[in-house]
Image: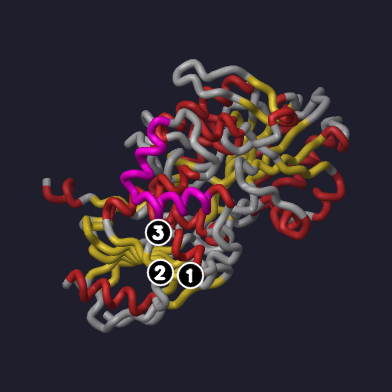
Amino acid sequence: MHDTALELAFGRGTLPLSLPARARPTVLRKADLPKLPDNAAAIRHAFAHPVNSAPLAELVKGRKSACILVCDITRPVPNRLFLRPMIEAMLAGGIPADAITVLVATGLHRPNEGEELAELIGDPWVLERVSVVNHFARDEAAHVDLGPTPTRGTPVFIDRRFAEADLRIATGLVEPHFMAGWSGGRKVVAPGVAGHQTIRTFHSARFMEDPLAVQCNLVGNPLHEEQLEIVRKVGEIYALNTVLDEARDLVFVSFGEIIASHLAAVDYVEDATVIEVPRRFHTVVTSSAGYPLDKTYYQTVKGMVTPLDILAPGGTLIIASECSEGFGSEEFRAAQARLVELGPERFLATLTAKTLADVDEWQTEMQLKPMRVGRIQLYTTGLTDEERRVTGVEIVPDINEAIAQSLARSGDDSLAIVPEGPYVIPVCRERQAAA
């Protein structure tokens, strides 16, 4: 069926697709989630009716200081909706404005500053009223050492501003994460405001190659289990969790004890996000979910991993990502250069002996997963010629031509299209269907 209305999320807009007349597309989107009729009322209700905790108005009483974690610019969290009412509750409860810190949970990403920070926070009142600062994972003096986790011995270093705050609140977006199962909640604490030693342990092959460290799985996921042990080490933490629909509108918000409130959001969104498909496809077309996730090639790798369950062995995965900001960190670029130089098997062999991964090389390790399954093609309007070379994947100048060629190569006119990239998790149920 010829369908010119199909499009992928790309940058701040969309990328239209024009398929061959013979193509039979299966479009995979999140299930429709009802929009909240009144965002402000929903947030007030979440604060007043929390999960496994006292209401926010009671939590703030008697506290001398507070630290609120927010995700960095790579996550489209609607901070503009909830930061001011949260801070107003703190002020009303007697916490001085100069004792309230909003801390950007950058992990090992670069800081968000200037106009980008203003965009991230989304409310000038917040920037004017309280301190808004970035986390720097490599500043060892800025962290407290909480000792290793009891089960796997992960070193736990946490930003001092968060660890020593009287009231600690993490905020974030609950969406599939290709390694930690789900983003948000405990993940905003670690790796969000963890030291580089903690993050690089998470990113070591011991975790990366674990078959349970995959999207939408929390059961037996070693990364999730370590994150739970870390938040317990930190102590009393609360969280505000949001869920967005494809239009980036708020559809769910929960507040309360960090672990329980996060699970409430996961329970809400899981059925809408995990899409069962009865077969695998030789051609899968996806995106990096558009802005802000497709600002760099580093983040683009996520979109290559999440649809793997529906890619037939030897098939072609075509991903569109603007890469408006370029490649990513210098460390990631160096890791990609080593991948291209050594090849996948030798590159992986250099990782497996390490207790601490080099900064950002874990994302290159994740790229090995789709490369093991089939052919990976990238359509981008960003990246220099040298950056395109060290992606280690095939660059296509015309996404529609790439789709047509893949269909012709496979002799299969069926293809899967995932417009919103890694925010949708397609799962093949052909074995269950055959049973």
Q: Quadrant of residue 278?
A: bottom left
C-alpha gap between disc 1 and disc 2: 8 Å
**Comparing labels 3 and 1, the label whose residue is closer to the camera:** 3
Magenta range:
332-353
142 and 80: which is toward the camera: 142
Circle count: 3
Q: Are marks 1 and 2 in contact (CB under 8 Å)?
A: yes
Which kind of residue does numbered mark 3 sit on?
A: Gly
Query: Taking 2 as reference, is 27 above or below it?
Result: above
Residue at 69%, 23% (x, y): give it: 144
Magenta region's main secondary structure?
Answer: helix
Mark 1 closeness class: few <14, some 14–19, many ≥20 residues within 10 Å? many
Query: Split into 4 quadrants, where in the image is the C terminus?
Result: top left
Residue at 41%, 45% (x, y): give it: 365
> Any magenta on residue 360?
no
The residue to which callout 2 is attached is: 395
Which kind of residue does numbered mark 1 sit on?
A: Thr
The residue to which callout 1 is attached is: 380
Residue at 51%, 50% (x, y): give it: 334
